[in-house]
Image (tube, rainbow, N blue to C red):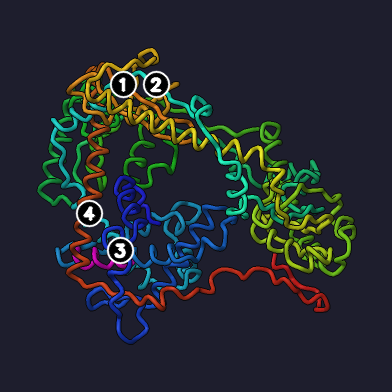
Amino acid sequence: MFEFVAKNKRLIQIILAIIFLPFAFFGIDSYFRGVGGGQAVARVGDYSISQEEFSRALRERQDTLRRLAQGRADPALLDNPELRYATLDGLIQRRLLLENALRAGVTVDDERLKEIIGRQQSFQDETGKFSPARYEQYLRSEGMTPVMFEARLRQDMIVQQFMDGYADSTFVPRSVSERLARLSGQQRELSQYVLSPEKFLGQVKLDPEAAKKYYDANPSEFRIPEAVRLEYLTLSVESLQQQSRVDPAEVRKYYDSNRRQFEVRESRQAAHIFVSAEAAAGADARQKARARAEELHNQLQKAPGSFAELAKTRSEDPGSAANGGDLGYIDPGSMKDVPEFEAALYKLKPGEISAPVETRLGFHIIRLTAVRPGQSKSLEEVRPQIEQELRKQLAARRFAELADNFNNVAYEQSDSLKPAADLIGTAPQASGWITRSRAAEPLLNNPRLLAAVFADEVRRGKRNTEAIEVAPGTLIAARVVERRPESTRSFDEVRAALEKRIALREAGRLAVEEGRRLLVELTQGKNVQIAWSAPQLAARSGFTNIPEPVVRQAFRLDSSKLPAYAAVENLQVGYTLLRVTRVQDAADLPPEQTEELANGLRRILAQEAMSAYLANLRQKAGVTINKEWLEKKEDSTPPPPSSKPDRSAPPRRSGF
């Protein structure tokens, strides 16, 4: 939501993992101690989570899921018990962390809050400056006042700072990370012997009535669900876009009106030597950093050619220091976090070195390496791009014009799709067989459409469905042209396949029994005659032609005494014996790979530590939940289409 949070992706992963694993350490039942009277959804100590607060958080999470699914989310996923409990658990955890952060003295001053708000793109005008009007408009659209929004943002930042300090305290000894790196690169030499069910089929004595008994005991397994075939019409922005024709005069007009859009602005290649000093570091620290920067600048005045060498040895920006301070090409407006840097850069001449430039991060000595001049693209260069944009606009307008009429015609003249087809100029398409739960065609595999198609009036009455939005900018109206009732396959149809399946299952059981006997003998050191496969080196990843479960099992074995034996059971494919005969340790890994593994371990440890910390906070706070209210359904998702729509009602508006 906020740029401040977006820059801390590592910790966000930890936060999300905590939020989406509700009640992992306690179980739901441990909370239901009864919250007493009132309208609270839950209580955290003396703090009540109101129905309004919970409903707002649930709507925000549902909106996020809709955006991620691009409007195709199953309505059942948007208001189920798991999502509601996860949402409430997130509110509880946030409250616990906020209270303890405030108790620990974590604060966010007004200047920092103002800076974060000012940097939000949603609140900026075309010039990149903070716009009070846009800020207020956004808050009105969210139903919030500035006081409410700023208080919420301040709380988010306090919680984030508190978690920063907690997670950054996680420590992984170097010896542990090096050991982890060696283990991750280890290889093991293994051989396999597979006892497949087919080898034991000759030993299976199948009861003549086994297949019939199974058939009678599992009727649902042989049921063929009801299915229908459709003819349907699709009205979409995409199809209208393909039909749209663009007037060349409109292309010229668009180009002339949007010339700035087709300009390649001047960019400048910069290098810098950076001396770190955060704004919150204090006056003394800032002054010392300034002195170091001025000392470096004095050296450069005497020897400008030493810039790259000084950057490598003295710059505190690890990302650019190794490259002599090179930052690559910088476009205007791309350094909004440090506007002083950009302002100084665009005053320099090629090869010129600036005096120390102060930003909120510290001090920068900047060298302008090169200038790439701006230029305008010609009409011919951008004509395809403009035509595509104009086609989109024309299609969107045409879609808006047709959508309501398409819906009304399909519904009112429900005995045929022809009137609706004539309206949009498209012929109906034919579908394959469709069940209540699934359609092979992706566009038809939509829960709302499937529910409408199997409504009695459409399925049995052969009437059109209404126009249903199956994807953003895509409407479908359909009718049933053929229906296949639910039925059950006869025993004679499935008998042969069923007898083979039962026989293989019994053979698989015999293979497992024999494999277990052999494994016991091998682990006891007995001389067992087995046709092992040729030895192969296997790594923890990159399984090549060795099945993944076999490799996983091989790396679980104690390798202190070789050969070592284990097995993998699978009734379908048999019983696999495996033998590890050699362990090959990894060569020394590059430092960056070792550091990456250490960082991963730190993240895991931080997550576990935070989970344990939250468990302790919950126990002390005494969390209680109103289970009855929590499990009420919200009116946040549209109801499914009625199976008996009133065809005599006035023309409806689809809302598209």
Please identify the quadrant where the C terminus is shown. bottom right
Q: Which secondary structure class fits the magenta region best?
A: helix
Please name the residue that numbered disc 2 is placed on: 193
Inspect the image, locate mark 4, and give the three-letter code of the amino acid beneath it: Met
For the question of whether residue 182 can be seen, the reply is no
Please identify the quadrant where the N terminus is shown. bottom left
Find numbered disc 3 in the image and state the secondary structure of the residue it sits on: loop
Please name the residue that numbered disc 3 is placed on: 27
CB under 8 Å between discs 2 and 4:
no
Query: Label 1 to label 4, Cα distance in Å?
Result: 40 Å
Nearer the viewer's eye, disc 4 or disc 3?
A: 3
Question: Mark 3 or mark 1, which is nearer the start of the sequence?
Answer: 3
Find numbered disc 2 in the image and state the secondary structure of the residue it sits on: strand
Kindly indicate the quadrant of the structure image that contains residue 274: top left
Badge 4 local density, few (<14 within 10 Å), some, or many (20+)? some
Please name the residue that numbered disc 4 is placed on: 610
Closer to the camera, 435 or 531? 531
Badge 2 local density, few (<14 within 10 Å), some, or many (20+)? some
Residue 418: x and y, percent?
A: 90, 57
Find numbered disc 4 in the image and state the secondary structure of the residue it sits on: helix
For the question of whether residue 126 can be seen, the reply is yes
Nearer the viewer's eye, disc 1 or disc 3?
A: 1
Inspect the image, locate mark 3, and give the three-letter code of the amino acid beneath it: Gly
Residue at image location 67% in from the left, 56% down from the top: 470
